């Protein structure tokens, strides 16, 4: 006999708030958001600057809905795409009920992170600090970091977690929920993200580019979902373009005899079927477009604002 479904939370008992999850590249923000939501909503790779767009994960803790804005890592922008990503990160922090600064505890505080901390110090939003990757960081270093951050930011609280192992996540989630204001939920109980299926499809394919190509194709690529078609049999057909800047990059994505592209498509299709819950037909095409970073329409499609 299965347990009955929990009764829905009455609107007058609900709480809901927005948390901007910020940090330097590769701090583990997306892994943390996924852990708090309880399932994958943001793509993850070992490479820094994997996240390009503001993506919201929706977590439930008792009567509280926590809206987690997973922002691109804040770094020193050099290109238009960089500037758009950094603008998205700071934009995600605007009007948040709470800013959660995620720090790679193992890496510690370096120059770029120091600049980010200074940028947060003058903001009016309340903030907490989350020291991530504590499972691979000596205790002495954690204590030293906590003291420095307390002096520099005066956060409401400092949490120590490992998003990868789940250590400290339950306590963190409960504490974040406690800080959310009273108010009605913004999303249905079964919705875990604000990303459209088209955006999710593009992100999953881009994740496979990072995971399979590593340093061979750093950031000179984008994925555009050209067509997303639901079929009568319940499956979905997705047509995507992988945009690269040069012919040599196209050859890298294709691989010998098209083997690499086939593997990228196979892994992305498997992941999409798991996330969407139905059969997926994924069609990938690699296109050389030297000026793809200057395409306003592409920025709109991937959820970034055009930044001059």
Image: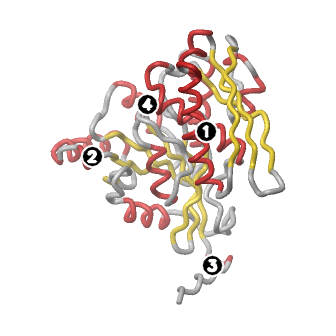
Residue bearing the label numbered 1: 203
Along the line of sight, which residue is nearer the eye, 170 or 151?
Answer: 170
Q: Earlier in the sequence, mark 3 or mark 2?
A: 3
Query: Is residue 178 toward the left or the right of residue 238 in the image?
Result: left
Q: Earlier in the sequence, mark 3 or mark 4?
A: 3
Query: Is residue 50 toward the left or the right of residue 106 in the image?
Result: right
In this rendering, the label closer to the viewer, 2 or 1: 1
Residue bearing the label numbered 3: 9
Q: Measuring from the top left, give residue 115's x and y in whole percent.
A: 41, 28
Residue bearing the label numbered 2: 146
Residue at position x 75%, y 49% in the image:
236
- Marker disc for residue 182: none
Query: Is residue 128 toward the left or the right of residue 247 in the image?
Result: left
CA gap between label 2 and label 4 equals: 26 Å
In this rendering, the label closer to the viewer, 2 or 4: 4
Q: Measuring from the top left, give residue 195's x and y in whole percent.
A: 67, 48
Q: Residues within 10 Å of mark 3 (few under 14, many from 20)?
A: some
Q: Which SS class for mark 1?
A: helix
Along the line of sight, which residue is nearer the eye, 77 or 222?
Answer: 222
Q: Which SS class for mark 4?
A: loop
Q: Which SS class for mark 2?
A: helix
CA gap between label 2 and label 1 equals: 34 Å
CA gap between label 4 and label 1 equals: 14 Å
Residue bearing the label numbered 4: 47
CA gap between label 3 and label 2 equals: 37 Å
Residue at position x 77%, y 33% in the image:
226
């Amino acid at each position: 006999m299965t347990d009955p479904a929990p009764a829905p939370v009455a609107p007058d008992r609900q709480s809901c708030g927005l948390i901007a999850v910020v940090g330097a590249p590769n701090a583990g923000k997306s892994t943390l958001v996924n852990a708090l939501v309880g399932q994958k909503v943001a793509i993850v790779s070992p490479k820094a600057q994997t996240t390009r767009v503001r993506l919201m994960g929706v977590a439930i803790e008792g009567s509280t809905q926590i809206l987690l804005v997973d922002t691109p890592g804040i770094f020193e922008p050099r290109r238009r795409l960089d500037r758009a990503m950094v603008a998205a990160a700071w934009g995600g922090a605007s009007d948040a009920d709470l800013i959660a600064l995620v720090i790679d505890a193992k890496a510690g505080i370096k120059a770029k992170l120091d600049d980010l901390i200074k940028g947060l110090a003058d903001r009016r939003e309340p903030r907490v600090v989350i020291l991530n990757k504590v499972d691979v960081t000596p205790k002495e270093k954690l204590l030293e970091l906590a003291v420095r951050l307390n002096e520099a930011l005066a956060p409401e609280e400092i949490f120590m977690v490992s998003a990868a192992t789940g250590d400290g996540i339950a306590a963190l989630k409960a504490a974040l929920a406690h800080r959310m204001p009273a108010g009605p939920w913004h999303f249905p109980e079964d919705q875990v993200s604000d990303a459209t299926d088209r955006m999710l499809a593009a992100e999953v394919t881009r994740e496979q580019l990072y995971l399979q190509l590593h340093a061979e194709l750093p950031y000179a690529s984008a994925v555009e979902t050209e067509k997303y078609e639901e079929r009568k049999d319940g499956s979905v057909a997705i047509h995507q373009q992988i945009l690269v800047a040069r012919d040599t990059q196209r050859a890298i994505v294709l691989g010998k005899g098209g083997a690499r592209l086939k593997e990228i498509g196979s892994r992305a299709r498997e992941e999409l079927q798991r996330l969407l819950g139905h059969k997926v037909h994924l069609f990938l095409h690699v296109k050389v477009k030297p000026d793809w970073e200057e395409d306003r329409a592409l920025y709109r499609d991937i959820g970034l604002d055009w930044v001059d």
